[in-house]
Amino acid sequence: MTSENLHETATELRLATFRLARRLRSVRAVDSRNAAMSDAQLGVLAALRAHGRHSLTALADRERVTAPTMSAVVTGLEEQGYVTRIPDDQDRRRVHVEITPAGEKVVAETLQRRTELLVAEITELGLTGRELTVLHEASILMRKLAEL
């Protein structure tokens, strides 16, 4: 692949990813309390659901934000009852953040709705078996890129 082809592929991937992510972000669990939930808050809840209890510092590192920013995000989630802060047993200055059942429910419902949207849109496209295979293989590669 030439450097020009690589640049074109990267550009197309960026545009497609941005548009798809924007559409997916618009789909959330519906409930009057969730209307004001930010993408950052939902991201933190999803990280806690997937990876378990984290310190504020570890959460900030995982989400690539500063500790004060993460503290503000967690405070908002705590006020809504989606997370709880747990003091560290060895160091009382450290705090761990854990998702609550209400937070678990919001993440599960949101992910389900987003998956349902993708299933409906993929179905509407009427992709062939080969196209579905290519899409699946591309999703694996995109995940690798996202995890760098």
Image: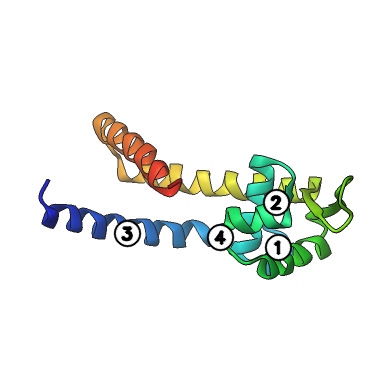
Residue 22 position (above or below residue 127): below
Label 3: how many residues lie within 10 Å, few (<14), some (14-19) or many (20+)? few
Q: Secondary structure at mark 2?
A: helix
Q: Which residue is mark 2?
A: 106
Front one among 125 and 148: 148
Q: Identify the residue at horizontal 48%, vertical 49% (top origin).
A: 117
Image position of 76 (left or right of 143)? right
Closer mark to the observer between disc 2 and disc 3: 3
Foreground tag (1 vs 3)? 3
Quarter occupied by residue 41: bottom right
- Which comes before the other along the chain, label 1 or label 3? 3
Along the polypeptide, which appears first: circle 3 or circle 4? 3
Give the x, y percent position of residue 103: 75, 51
Q: Residues within 10 Å of mark 2 (few under 14, many from 20)?
A: many
- Tag 4: residue type? Arg
Q: Residues within 10 Å of mark 4 (few under 14, many from 20)?
A: few
Tell me the residue that label 4 is attached to: 64
Q: Give the label on residue 129, or none.
A: none
